[in-house]
Structure formats: structure tokens, C-alpha cells
Image: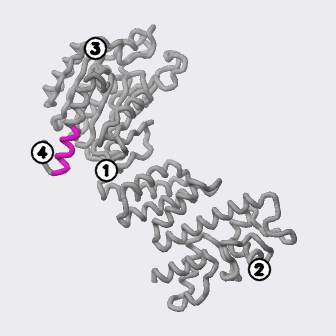
Amino acid sequence: MEGIHSKAIEGFWRGYLKYDYWTDMNSVELIRVIVYAMGVSFGTNADLSVFDPCSPFDTEDSSARALPRLLGEDVVHTGFAPEFGSGLWASDLASARRAQLAVILKLNQAACLLALERFCEAAEICEDLIKNGKLGERREKTVYRLISALIGVAEDGEDETKALSRARQLLDDFTRERTLKISLQNRIFSLARSSSIRLRPPEANFHVTYVAPKDDEPPVMLLIVLHGFGDGKAALGKMAEKMELPGVACLVLQGPRRLPSELLPAGGEEIGYYWFDNIDLARGGEPLTRGDESLEKGSLESLCKLSGYLDETLIGTVGWKSSEIAFLGVGQGGTFALEIGRRMEKEFAGFFVLNPDELPLGCPEEKRRVPQRVVLVSGREDGGAMTVLSNHEWLNRAPSLSSVRSIKSELTSEGDMVQLHEQPGKAMDVLKDRNGEGEIFMRFIASRLAAVRMRSLGAEE
């Protein structure tokens, strides 16, 4: 039956569709396949044999007169009604009309191929349209059919990673009704999870920058990057791109809160963000200490938001395991990461934290969660992990070494395995990759990546 359907479709697109193809099948069934799959209204008196789509433009003949009935209202409403008496395409818009009609025909051809489950061919047509066609208002339809074709390719087991990655990329260009987009998203990520393919996460409540592993190889581990107080995702996003970590995808998140504009320098559109209130702006930036009600409330609200994103999106939708997720945090972002490790009852791959602020919350009252692996870095020469304006001293103050040592002591007492590196220079130097300055961070990444790979093979670290 599939061969007969294929012949019928191929014959239609060459203008040679004859009734002898229908001898061994129900003709009504075939007509329904063509009509509904192509999305074209033929009209009750349309004659399939009078229109040759390969050359319909040259003369005013029966093919030209059949054009509106064959192609339906979609064509008529976009200006493709024949201009009788002066030739079908005699106007100055002939070239544009031919191009638009070609798009319609190719879109409907792709729909036919989708109905016949010839997904690779449908995908090729849609990709070609997106690359070369002037789609206009039909771009959404083209993207939808291409995503559908790529899902079909993945379901057939043909290059699943490439097909699903491309489908995920196209989702960002698809802006039709939200329910349809969510349906496509669910299908894409469901297929990816079943094949252990980790795709770029869908849109979330956070502003994020996603950086794929080096050479676009499939990621094995996810590194979540959290900036410091008063910074933003832009600088760390550029840093993540330069790292080119093999097997590691980076997800740089931006804090949900922002400092008042009067505290930010001119041109500071990309900075000023933070995770929770640990200073009192009304009192000139006085630090809030543990036990302060507003500090506890603000930090718990942000923790709830991020833990929900981890659980529902990264783990639930994308399919990451918590043991495959590591954190890189700077200043307040590092403190925030440590609190995630303390509050969520999950074992993560590890935490690499530079110049953390004081932990805002006490030890969880419930039973201690699984131990986390933590690397703390303190820089002796830091101008401040929270730099925003030089004339606001409270925004330029790096945590003292004794403060970082206190954090190490507290985490160790709670069961974490903590290493502390005291840098003679700046803490951020450990992220650089020249003259051995990046050795500490790269050693952390290598060890965590090795642990993730061992777990995937069923071995214990």
C-alpha cells in the first residue's frame, strides 16, 4: 500500500496522476490523503489531471482556469487568481507570484510526504524552503512541518541526536499558539529522554545563556554557572564560550532581582543582577546577617524558584540526573549554589565556588541530605566579587579569608567533602587557562566528568 501511495503522490507532483494508479486501492482513501495532508481545498469539480504543477504559468489554458479550483482559497486570497485576457502571469508581480506559489506547492508536497511517513524527504524540502525561500507569513507553517518531520526521523531511529537537536533549535522560532508549541516540545524532549540525549533546556523563568560542549559533541555533564552580586550572565557567558569544555554543557543563569538604576554605571544594562537581598539598601548597604527575617525570606524564595527549575525543567523535562549537574558560582552566586546543595535532597556532581558570601541560612533541621563535593577558592587580592561602583564600598567588598574558612568548617560539620584553595592573587584567576592558572578548575571538571562517566557504567566513585 505504501508503494501505491508513493506513486500517486509522485505522479501528482509531476502532473501525471492518472486513475490507473487507483485500481488496487480505495480511491476515496487516496483523495482524502492528498486533500487533508496537503491542506488544499480542491473543490467538488476539480479535475486532478488538468494541472501540471511543473509548468502552469506559460499559457492561458484549461490548466490556468483550473488553478483557483485546484489550489483553493489560500491561493486566491494571496493574489494568484488568473489574469484572463492578458496571460496568467502578465503583471509586474509575476516573478513574486511564481515564488509564492512555489512555496505553497512545496509546503503541500512536504505535508503529503509527512502523511506517507517519508520524513527525511519532508525535512529536506522544509529545510530548503527555510534556507532559500521567501516564506513571509508561511514561515511558521514551514517550521511546524519541519519540526514534525524531524520528530518522525528521530522516531524512526535515524540520527536521533542530530534530528532532535535541530528540532529543539527550531522551537525558538515557533511562535504559534502556546498549546501547540508545548505539545511539540513534549514530544521532542520525551524522545530525547528515552534515548539519553540531553538537549538545550526549554524556556524558563530565568534568563539563561546555553553553551554547548566543544565541537557540539553530546553533553555528559551540565555545569550551571551563577554570577555574583551586582553582575549578570553576559560576562560569565562569554567566559563559558571560551572554555570549550569537552563533554560539558554550560548553563549561565541570571539573577531574578536587580539593583536600582542609580547605583549602576552608565551603559550598565548587562549588570546589576543578584539572587537574594543580603544587604539593606535603605541603610546604605548594611549587610544582613543570618537570623534576619528579610534575609531568610528572600533567600528561601529564590531557592524555591531555582530548585523548581532544576526539578521540573532540567531533571524532569530535559532528563538530566542530579548527579550529572555541577555548579560554578561566584560570590553570592556561589553562596546560592551551596544553599541549593544544602536544601535539595539530591546528590549533585560537585560545587566550585569562588569567594562565597556568608551562608544566609542555618543548618537544615531535617535529616542531613547526602554529602556534596565542594571546592572553595578565596582570593587575597580581589577588588571585590561584587564590584558595581567604586564609590559604593559595600559593593566592592570581597569576603575575608576567615569568612570563607568559616563556611568550609560549617559545610564539613554537615557532612560535605570540602577543599579550600587560598589564592595569592584573585579567585577568578583559577578559571583562566594559561600558564597553569586554570589547573585547579580544570582538575575539578575532569574529576567530576570522570565520576559522571563511571556512574553511567554502573560503577561507584
Which mark is in front, 2 or 4? 2
Say few, some or many: other residues with alpha carbon within 10 Å of mark 2 (under 14 / 14 to 19 / 20 or more): few
**Would you identify the image quadrant in which residue 378 lies?**
top left
Residue hosting label 1: 319
Q: Mark 3 points at which residue?
A: 425
Q: Which residue is drawn at 35% across and 50% down?
A: 317
In this rendering, the label closer to the viewer, 1 or 2: 2
Could you tell me if the residues under marks 4 and 3 are in contact, i.e. CB atoms within 8 Å?
no
SS type, badge 2:
helix
Q: Read off the residue under disc 4.
A: 460
Q: Residues within 10 Å of mark 4 (few under 14, many from 20)?
A: few
Location of residue 217 with respect to 133 vertically, above or below? above
Residue 267 occupies quadrant: top right
| Residue type, mark 3 in image | Gly
**How far apart in space, not on screen, are marks 4 and 3 (Cα)?**
36 Å
Other-residue count near label 3 (Cα within 10 Å), few / some / many at <14 / 14–19 / ≥20: few
- Mark 4: secondary structure: loop
Position of the C terminus by quadrant = top left
- Distance, label 1 to label 4, CA atoms, is 21 Å
How crowded pointer 1 is (Cα within 10 Å; few <14, some 14-19, many 20+) is rated as many
User: Magenta stretch?
Assistant: 448-457
Amino acid found under the numbered disc labelled 4: Glu
Q: Would residue 438 appear left or right of 178 to someone viewing this image?
A: left
Residue at 78% over, 58% down: 93
Residue 162 vertical position relative to residue 157 in the rendered view, above or below: above
Q: Tally the numbered discs.
A: 4
Q: Nearer the viewer, residue 63 or 44?
A: 63
Using the image as rendered, state which of residue 101 and residue 339 is in the foreground: 101
Choose the circle earlier in sequence order: 1 or 4.
Answer: 1
